[in-house]
Amino acid sequence: DAGVTQSPTHLIKTRGQQVTLRCSPKSGHDTVSWYQQALGQGPQFIFQYYEEEERQRGNFPDRFSGHQFPNYSSELNVNALLLGDSALYLCASSSGSWETQYFGPGTRLLVL
Amino acid sequence: GESVGLHLPTLSVQEGDNSIINCAYSNSASDYFIWYKQESGKGPQFIIDIRSNMDKRQGQRVTVLLNKTVKHLSLQIAATQPGDSAVYFCAENMNRDDKIIFGKGTRLHILP
């Protein structure tokens, strides 16, 4: 049983570009959350998707958007990239409030 | 802003000794407190969590203690091994599928 998977593993972009990151949840999970982890910091919550809708959102600008598909996989889109968007982007999946969330390995994004 | 913080950024422990990692939190409304282990280049790995109505919970070689009076959380690792080297984050949320609020992390360094 595969855990949470993310693609790509690494990505290099330049300022102003747009990026799409992908996440496949753990089998049986229907909720996907995205986090941004800057170097040396703890992960920061971006948003959460459930039933193809954004259910919660953290303190991130509208440049950060997402989508969840009928198969529960999810995408994170970031427009007009800034140097400060360089970070490890983590996806976590869960199923209901009785089970903990499981994290994927992350996508490391470098903005030049 | 962050409601979970850590007292020490780095902890060095002799192999075989017990490790104690401490954490302070400020949101008394949180219901779950979680410890994650993050190894270099990987996503956070769930270690153990504790609900607010408990003061102690044990897992395999790990124990989490919760003191709600002083809003303090600790992780004890028995007989520390080289494989325990990682950054440890305490975190909290209202429900297990709710957004997770992470602290800044403590790096555990194992001395031979």
Image: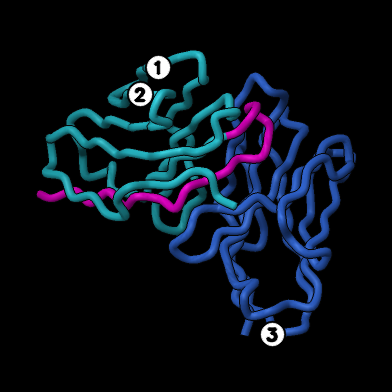
Left or right of A30? Residue B85 is left
Q: Do labels 2 and 1 share a chain?
A: yes
Instruction: For chain B, give the colour.
Output: cyan
At label 3, counting other C-alpha atoms closer than 10 Å, the crowd grade (few under 14, some 14-19, many 20 or more) is some
Left or right of B54? Residue B82 is left
Asked whether residue B96 is drawn in magenta, I would say: yes
Magenta-drawn segment? B93-112
- Residue A25 in which image quadrant: top right
Residue drawn 77% across and 83% down? A16
Residue drawn 53% across and 44% down? B3
- Residue A85 in which image quadrant: bottom right
| Image: B98 above or below B83 | above
Q: Name the residue under label 3.
A: A14
Q: Mark 2 points at which residue?
A: B65
Q: Do the residues labelled 2 and 1 touch (CB within 8 Å)?
A: yes
Q: What element carries label 1?
A: loop
Q: Where is residue B53 in the image (x, y as percent from the top left)?
A: 51, 14
Q: Residue A86 has which mark?
A: none
Instruction: For chain A, give the colour.
Output: blue
Chain under numbered label 3: A
From the viewer's side, name the closer residue of A26 and B7: B7
